[in-house]
Image (cartoon, rainbow, N blue to C red):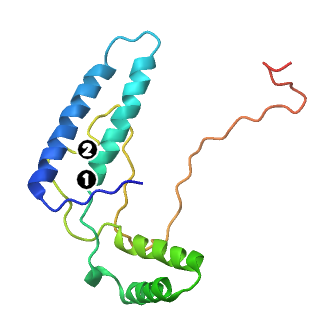
């Protein structure tokens, strides 16, 4: 897994503009006449990856220590002690991975707002990105009304002999 940390907003602006231009070029390539749809599918997969990159660039900055809730700070301290004092490498690795989840998540500051919204292309699905945690709300869960058709048990599958 690759990570990018930006310390310069001008560099972030330039990279976002370059990604926006690449996205426009890929969108034009995707609209090309392609009878089999092979080029379109391939280009659209690249567009989705590029839009995911742009969406991650538009996330809020990493969380600050003071933004953690008291119980989260306590858990962070416990994991830090475990990570640095454990003689068992597997326990230390598990604690280290937990520490990373505390650190590598969006905070409450305003996200980068340069360029057009990264998921603005109507023909692409919007990438899901991490958001700051919200309190659980009591309510009805959403379920699709779609039900799969069942095959009759005595009906053979076609295509296999």
Q: Is residue 77 above or below residue 140?
A: below
Q: Residue at x 23, y 26 (%)?
A: 25
Give neighbour class at mark 2: few <14, some 14-19, many 20+ (Cα, 10 Å). Answer: many
Q: Residue at x 21, y 60 (%)?
A: 111
Question: Which label is found at residue 140?
Answer: none
Tell whether 161 sits left or right of 125. right
Q: Position of residue 9 (x, y in %)?
A: 11, 57
Q: Quadrant of the N terminus?
A: bottom left
Q: Position of residue 81 (x, y in %)?
A: 45, 89
Q: Position of residue 37 (x, y in %)?
A: 44, 17
Depth check, front residue: 99 or 111:
99
Q: Residue at x 31, y 40 (%)?
A: 50
Q: Are marks 2 and 1 in contact (CB under 8 Å)?
A: yes
Q: Is residue 77 above or below residue 117?
A: below
Q: Give the distance between the C-alpha atoms of the residues marked 2 and 1, in whole angstroms.
A: 9 Å
- Mark 2 or mark 1, which has the lower sequence index? 1
Where residue 113 sits, quadrant-wise, is bottom left
Q: Quadrant of the C terminus?
A: top right
| Residue furthest out toward the left | 10
Residue picked out by circle 1: 57
Where residue 77 sits, quadrant-wise, is bottom left
Depth check, front residue: 77 or 155:
77
- Between circles 2 and 1, the one closer to the viewer is 1
Question: Which label is found at residue 118?
Answer: 2
Where residue 122 sits, quadrant-wise, is top left
């Amino acid at each position: 897994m690759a990570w990018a940390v930006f310390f310069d907003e001008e560099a972030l602006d330039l990279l976002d503009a370059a990604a926006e231009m690449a996205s426009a070029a890929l969108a034009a390539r995707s609209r090309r006449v392609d009878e089999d749809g092979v080029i379109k599918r391939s280009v659209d997969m690249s567009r989705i990856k590029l839009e995911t990159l742009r969406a991650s660039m538009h996330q809020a900055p990493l969380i600050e220590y003071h933004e953690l809730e008291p119980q989260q700070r306590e858990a962070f301290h416990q994991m830090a002690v475990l990570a640095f004092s454990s003689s068992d490498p597997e326990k230390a690795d598990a604690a280290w991975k937990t520490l990373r989840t505390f650190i590598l998540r969006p905070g409450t500051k305003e996200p980068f707002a340069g360029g057009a919204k990264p998921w603005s292309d109507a023909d692409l699905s919007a990438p899901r990105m991490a958001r700051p945690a919200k309190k659980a709300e009591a309510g009805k869960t959403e379920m699709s009304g779609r039900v799969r058709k069942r095959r009759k048990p005595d009906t053979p599958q076609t295509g296999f002999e």
